Structures are given as structure tokens and as C-alpha cells.
Amino acid sequence: MDPLEQIKVTFFQECQELLADLEAGLMALEAGEADGDTINAVFRAVHSVKGGAGAFGMEDLVHFAHVFETTLDDTRAGRLVADDEVIKVMLRASDMLADHVAAAQGGPAVDMARSEALAGELAALGLTPSDAGPVIEELPGLDFTPLPAFVPGDEPVPDELGFTPMRASLDLPEMPPPAGWRVQLTPGAGMYAKANDVTPLLRELERLGPCLTTLDASALPDLAAMDAEGAYLSWTVDLAADCPREQVAEAFEFVDGDCTLTIEPMGPAPAADVFPTDLEALLAEARLPMAPSSEAEVQAVIDEVVPPIPVKVAPAAAAAATAASEAGAGPAAQATIRVDLERVDRLIDLVGELVINQAMLAQRVAEAGVTRSSNVAVGLDELEQLTREIQDSVMAIRAQPVKSVFQRIPRLVREIAASTGKQVRLVTEGEGTEVDKTVIERLSDPITHMIRNAIDHGLESPAQRRESGKPEEGTVKLVALHRSGRIVIEVSDDGAGINRPRVRQIAVDKGLIDPEAGLTDDEIDNLIFLPGFSTAATVSNISGRGVGMDVVRRSIQALGGRISITSVPGKGSTFTMSLPLTLAVLDGMVVTVGEQTLVTPLTAIIETLQPKAADVRTLGPSSRVIAVRDAYVPLVDVGAVLGWRREAPDPCDGVCLLVESEGGGRAALLVDAIQGQRQVVIKSLEANYQQVPGIAAATILGDGRVALILDVDAVIALRGRTAPPPPLALAS
Amino acid sequence: MSLTVLTVDDSKTMRDMLMLALRDAGFDVVQAVDGVHGLEVLDQSSPQVIITDINMPRMDGFGFIEGVRRDSRHRGVPILVLTTESDPGKKDRARQAGATGWIVKPFTPAKLVDAIRRVAA
Amino acid sequence: MIEAATNPSEPRRELVSFRAGDQEYCVDIMAVREIRGWTPSTTLPQSPPYVCGVINLRGAVLPIIDFNCRLGRESVTPSARHVIIVTHIGHRLVGLLVDAVSDILTVTDDAIQPTPDVACDTVRSFVRGILAIDGRMISLVALDRILPDLEAEAA
């Protein structure tokens, strides 16, 4: 890629981080949790966006960023107080800035009228610091032009040569162009203190034309009396060049003020006196010695900051080392490197294949009759251990905190709250919870829909809340945590909860349930997940964007996840979504059911049981339960649920897996035998086929055959539907 | 023998752009991400010219320049300040801190090299 | 290789023809990824009778469809005598269980006759045309509906 294009990519990546910092800082200010540096950090974020955008000529973005930056500058300087109203405008400005960045990246164009209006609001904030009047609302049709002081582009832009456009000097009489210029330069001590040096300046003049340089060293005292940092020399340069005075003056731009400088036009006759002097020697005395740098020193810096990476795999490590040395400029405290995601994915795929191969090898060795205590078997065990560790480490590389998903939510909440007229406060917890990249990218949509649902349907309007004695501002809580080897995301609201009679009635009206059916509260709550269900009497603009909770549930289930809802009328509702930590690997228990080999996720299994006849009881017409210590647990025949056999086998001939479902209930899954525990690589069924009820995914076992991975919750849920018909036919 | 330039800027984009322009012009480049880091790298690499941003976390450009000038080993190193602000107040403050010159953003590679030439021995 | 071209200058298509049950069919060669022998598949629960199961295709899970059964005829008992045609359907890979692969046909579009209207849904869903070659009737099939239709099954 063209290097400038690569930097543009970097810029947009950096913008994402900056915009996140900006939003976080503003929210901290809003919550009163800011510290002394917060406002500076906020300013810097916008400043940096503007700087980079300017380099790439992204004018609209620069223009808006500049207005925003000015307002922030006023705030950090104390000229503007950041009260609630001001911060609200700034939050909207940060959203608009993000929109401008997206547009610059090729995304949807920004509504410039809105942008200009918001810029006007920002500018107005600075103009009326202590005015208690209301912030100027966006008035359609009002063309608010910011004051010229805030608009960049008023400053004269130097051209390629750094030459500032000349302004006509009115007090110079018409004169013929001089044959050259005589420059007299007497540096002051301040000039050297700023490390300005005369040599480069003289060099600059030489580039304009031939120079005759004389040095006046008359003020130079004895070496003993000389102040090493003092200034005693004076130069006169006769420059024979037909150029404007400004061009000569420009060379001295940096030193102007620290020296005595005169630039006079030179007559056709050159100056007569020329004192050749050993310029170099005198300059060497006057100049302070500088530490020499060398290739070796620079290399030493790099080696110190970036310890050499042991090279095993050539191309990847070489590239990673380059990446590391580029990033080595970063502070050593947090050693990270940027790596191409493709490389990590490839690595993970290869490790997955390694796991499969290792399992196949182990199987063949076992089949060949090698004893467990032999060297080969022991070696294989070690190999399995090593492979497992490699896999864990590699998966950890790709694990990311859910923060990146959570970061988009505050803005989403602001927008939905605004368009539904509700007041919402967002609380988040656990944004550091880590999950594999394969799962993270799939979290965003379900979370978005759950949040939309919570605000749109869950929370009441401010007026309704007032009537119920609740604070007008509703709270939506977004939590991520690890539980039982899975990641759990909860979205809860303190709204009105599910209106059960209404939900039930809608389900009946739509023919989704039998009017006579007796449903528990939980069952009614979960009706909203049925296809074809929509609670909104008028499908509001947001939730009606084509997605019902049934689609949300299906997409979560396609990942091997579950979603459920609990609700307390008047108090609020909580959506709970759980997903596997990774879509790549699974610890499983391999079992046989009939002639089929299945894998049950180990995280779902509490223990295994060998049922005895006395432990098995019958409840009701045909349901069986099994005694587990002091409790009775439903017995689920996996073979029957999956439709592989009709006759219930004798539980005592088989093995029971005691499992816990997401809702907390327990069940005993009846299988024929346990073959062992294994870590398996998850293969998707949906990639080439589709979702299969009761099955989460597939894997390839050591014998090369496909084995299905059970979806424990689904198997338990399916039990009701596929139970064999009761002996008495009921009138339907 | 090529010059070593130390660039100090908290924006990776800006660091990358400076690196590109400076390398193309034949300079060697070392980088730092803020004032504190800049002083550390300065100790280790002894560049001939420093280019620094003003707005940075931990220690801003002014603090960095003052820190450089306080150290007798580095007093003579020219420091160019990168600024989007043509605010004369900022320039003055930079110069008071000890800045040698300035470069206004957005800069062209040519302007960058010009400025370096004007201050580098 | 059989060519059935009435107009030499018209663009040609290549089709793979195969036998399933007592009928002959063909599909666009562009849809065919590979042809392999039969391996035992892993049964999928609660699946339609024409879905034999899934097999391992170099690390990917490949569904196998009993082609004869899918087209409404009787299902077969898969064995080593059968052949699996691995096809692309959209972004999916699907294996078709058939009796044997016959030829590769090169035809021009006008060699394809319209499907006779026999008032049968299955025919309408799958057959896109008929080829008459050497006295054989070969049905040109389109595979986009070959997998179970999710919505229809859920109804």
C-alpha cells in the first residue's frame, strides 16, 4: 500500500480511539467524575483529530473540529464553565464529529445544515459565558454564521516554499530593484539559548545567491574572560540576489527578537572591506559541544526498548519484529504489538487442526493396542497437554474485552432516548470481560436490539414514571460477566416490566398459543420470543426496523447461545443472554446414544450418575424423574428427544449426565455410555447447512467422522415437544 | 552522515507522517509519544534536531522544551515546535521555554525540511 | 464429452450429468466443486428424510442430500456404490448423493428445452429445462432450493 494511504488507515484507527476518549471524558464530566486532566484530554482528542484531518485535507471535518476545539480551549482555560447544558451540547458535538469522521472515511454524508447549526451552538457557548439564557436550540431555517475568529482559513497559508504572501508596503517609495541585500546580524545570548545557530542561517542566505560574509570579532574577549554562553560575534553578509526583502527576512524568522538584524538594499557597488577570517574556528569556540550520535547509539535505543524476539517461524516473526520496533517508540510499561488479524486467525485455525490431528493420532495409537503406561502413550499424553496449552495461549491472543462493543452504546442510548422522548441513564459494568473475537463481532446486534427494546418498550415516559412515583429518568443497566465458562450479558431496565395479560392476549389473538393453556409467568414472559410476535400497538420507528425478538433469539442460538427474560411488573425487566466464550473450541464429554456419538459441553455437566432402579420414579402419566441425593430431577432421554428411538431404554443400562440449564433448572440426560473427555474444535453446522434443533454445532473426532455437539438447554426444552403421545388421546 | 531527528507527538498519525517525510528526506528518525518519554529517548539517542508537538498528555510541549534546556547535555539541540495554532501567544510561550523555531500544521514535507535546515548545524 | 450445439457461434455451457434412481439430471459445471466416493454420514436429528446427514470434508462439515429422495422419489440406502457430488449453493457447500456421474455436456442455450408443465411443485422447484440427447431425457436442475426451507419447515 502507498505509505500515505497506510497512514490514512492509521489515522482513522486513531480517530476511533480519540473519539472514544472524547466521549468517555465528556461523560465523566457529566457525571462529575472528572479529574484535573479530563478536560485537557478531551481537548487533545479533538485537537489531534483536527491535526490529522488537516494533513489529509478533510475540510468539513477540520472546520467542525476547529469550532469544537475552540470551545474546548475556552473551557480548559476557564473562560467557559462546563455546566450540564454545555456538556450536553458537547456530547452532541462529539457525535457530530464522529459522523464527520465516518463521512471522511467514505461513510454516509453529513447533514451539513445540522453540522453548521451545531457549530453555531458551540460558538455561541463561547460568546455568552455567564449568560443564564437558554442554549440556542437548533432553529430550522436560521442561518447562523460563526464569527470569523473561529473559522480557519483566514490565516494566510504559506505556499510550497514557505513564502508568506507579501503585503504591499505603502511607505516605501518606488525604487529600482536592488542588486542585493546587506544583512547585518548580531546574535544575542538568547539566540544561542534556544539552540539557534548562525551557520544554518548563513547557509540559507547562500541558497538565495552568492554571499560575501565578513565576521566582526572585535567584541570577543579573552578566552579566560569569555562566557561560554555569551554572544560576542557579529556578521555582515553581502548577498547578491535579486529577491524580495521578505525572502531574506524569512530565513531569520526564528531568531527575530533574539538578535539585532538589519537588512538593507545594496547598491550596485559591492562593499569594499572584506576581512577573511577563520570562521570555522571561531564558531567552534563559540558553539557548545554536542554529543555525537551514531548508528550504534540508535540501535542501542531500539534494542533496549524492544527486546529481540526469538525467531522460530521466519516470516511472521520478522514482520512482527518490524511491527514491534515501529511500536517500540511507545512507553515500555505496556508492551503491546499490533498484529494482522489474519495472521492470528490463521494461527488459530492451524492450532485447531493440530488438536484434531493429535486426537486422531491418540486414537490410532490406542487402537493399535499400545499400553497406557508405555513410552508412546505417555508421550502422547504430554503432547495432548502441550497442545492444549498452545491452544489456550493462542485463543487468549484473540480474546478481547467487550469494551469495544459497549463503547457504541452510550450514543445509541442518547439517540433512542431523544427520539422516544424518554429520559435514560445508562450504567455499564464489566466492560473488561474478555471474549474471543469470533463472539465479539456477533454481540453488537443482539445487545443493540435488547437496549432498543428496553428503552422503547421497557421504560415508561417521564410523565408515567412521575405518576408511579419513580424518578423521571429511567435506568438501563448493561452488564457483562463470566459464568460457568460462558459469557453472560444482561440488559435490565427499571421500567414497567412485561404487561403479562396483554402479552398473553396478543399471543392468543395471533394464534400462537391455545387460549386454554395454563402458562406460568416465566412462560408468558418468554412468549415475546415467538415468531410473529410484536407488542407495539403501533410499531415504532426504532424497534420496527424489521427485527423482532424471535430473530434476535435465533441469531443468538445460532452462536450456541441462549437468551431469556425475567420481569417484575412495575419494577422492570432483565434480558439475559449467554454465549460460549469462543466459537472455536470446546471442552466436551463424548457419549454414545444408540449408534451415534455425541459431544456434551463439559461446562454444562455438573456430574455423571449411574442410576439404580430404586432411584428412578415416575411422575404423572409418563414423566420420569431420578433421585439425586435429596432432590428429584427430570430424566431426559436424549435418544428420544433427538428422534432416534421411540422406546424408552432402561435408565439403569445407561449413564445419566446431571446438567444445569440456563434458567437454573436441573435435568438428568440419559445416554448409553461415556467414551471420555476431549477438547474438540467446533465446526459450524450453519455454515453449510442450517440450525438443527437440539444441536449446537459439530466437531470432527479422531476417527475422522463428524460428531454432533449437544445444545443442552435446547434438548431439555425439546423434551416437552417430542414426548411420546400419552396413552389416552385427548380431544384437541 | 545523516541527521537524526527526534519526533515527539502523541498522535500516531502525526508520528507516521513525520517519519515518512523525514525518511524520504534522508533523515534518521527516533520517536516519542509525550514529553516524559521524549526526555527518556533524548538521553538515549542524542538527536541533532527535535520536533515536538505542544498538546500531549503527561507532559506537554512546553514542559518538554524546558526539560531539554535545563539539561546542559542537550541545551544546544535545536527544537522545532509543531503547531496548528498560529496563536502568537503559543509561539511566544514556546520560544520563552527555549524553542528554536516552529512548523505550522498542516505542513508539507518541503516546509518541514526547510525548517530543519534553518536550525540544524 | 458430448456436445449438443445447434448454433456454432452461440455461447456454450458445460453441464455435469448424473443418474439418480432411474432418471438423468444435469447441473451447471460451475456449481460443481468436486466428486467423491461415498463415506458414512452422521445422522442429524429431526431432519427431513432426504437429508442423509453430514460428513467431514477436509475439516468442514458437509451436509449430504439424497438427491432422488429430494426430488420426491424414493430414498436410497447409501452405500459404497453411490457417489457424492460436492456443489456450491450460494456460500454453502452441499453434497448430493447420486448413483453415478455420467458425462460432461457442452450445450448452447437453445439446446435447452422448456420444462413441460406437468403441474407438479417439485418439478417446478427444481427443474429448469430439459435436454434431449441421444434419445435420453436429461433434466437440468437448479440447486438453490435443494436445502430444507427453514421457514417452511417451521410452519
Image: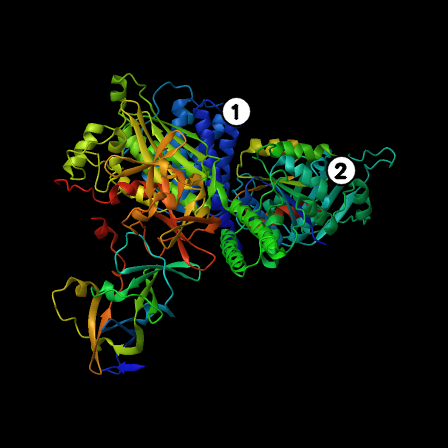
Is residue A263 left or right of A674 when viewed as pictured?
right
- Tell which of B67 and C152 is nearer to you: C152
Name the residue type under label 1. Asp
**Percent x, y for residue A720?**
26, 40
Is residue A618 left or right of A312 when viewed as pictured?
left
Is residue A125 left or right of A461 when viewed as pictured?
right
- Tell which of A205 and A684 is nearer to you: A684
- Tell which of C6 and A106 is nearer to you: C6
The residue most toward the front is A614
Is residue A628 left or right of A299 when viewed as pictured?
left
Image mark for residue A35: 1
Image mark for residue A498: none
Quadrant where the image shows the C terminus of chain A? top left
Residue B104 is drawn in which quadrant? top right
- Could you tell me if residue A163 is visible in this image? no
Q: SS at mark 2?
A: loop
Instruction: State which chain disc 1 sits on.
Output: A
Q: SS at mark 1?
A: loop
Image mark for residue B73: 2
Instruction: State which chain disc 2 sits on.
Output: B
- Could you tell me if residue A362 is visible in this image? yes
The residue sitting at 74% across, 50% down in the picture is A296
